[in-house]
Image (tube, rainbow, N blue to C red):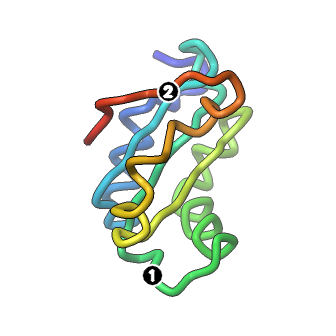
Amino acid sequence: MAESGVTEESLRTKITEQLQATHVAIEDMSGGCGQAFSAIIVSPLFEKKTTLAKHRLVNTALKAEIAAIHAWTPKCYTPEQWEKERGKVVAPGKETNGEVVTGTTA
């Protein structure tokens, strides 16, 4: 179990249930201690919302989890945006070191 009690699976489950997400990719960026996570979240609830409004929706849904961890980096897309972007997007946090993640689907 992660030190914080927060796991990739617990985040994925809560995001899927509370944000009606159609795609969720979570990555533990902390090396397994559960203190830093990045996420790609696709939800129809993000339609017609600014980036800030999307992040507020996510942060409100995950208030307790975010308080228990050190770092949280979400990337939020509408289903339409995701269809356009998914060929170009790498996992959040991967842009900085050049690694590309392929074949990651929910």
Q: Where is residue 67 in the image (x, y as percent from the top left)?
A: 69, 44
Sequence-wise, the earlier of marks 2 and 1 is 1
**Residue placed under numbered mark 2 in the picture:** 100
Q: In this view, does 43 lie above or below 16?
A: below
Which residue appears at 60% of the width and 29% of the height?
94
Q: In front: 99, or 54?
A: 99
In the rendered view of the protein, which quadrant contains the C terminus? top left
Instruction: Tell us which disc is closer to us: 2 or 1.
Output: 2
Can residue 30 be seen here?
A: yes
Image-quadrant location for residue 80: bottom left
The residue under label 1 is 47
- Residue name at image x 51 percent, y 37 percent: 91
Q: In this view, does 97 lie to the left or right of 48?
A: right
Q: 9 and 68: which one is in front?
A: 9
The kind of residue tagged 1 is Glu
- Residue found 58% across the figure and 44% down from its top: 65
* Most distant residue in the bottom direction: 48
Q: Position of residue 44 (x, y in %)?
A: 36, 75
- Is disc 2 placed on a helix, strand or loop? loop
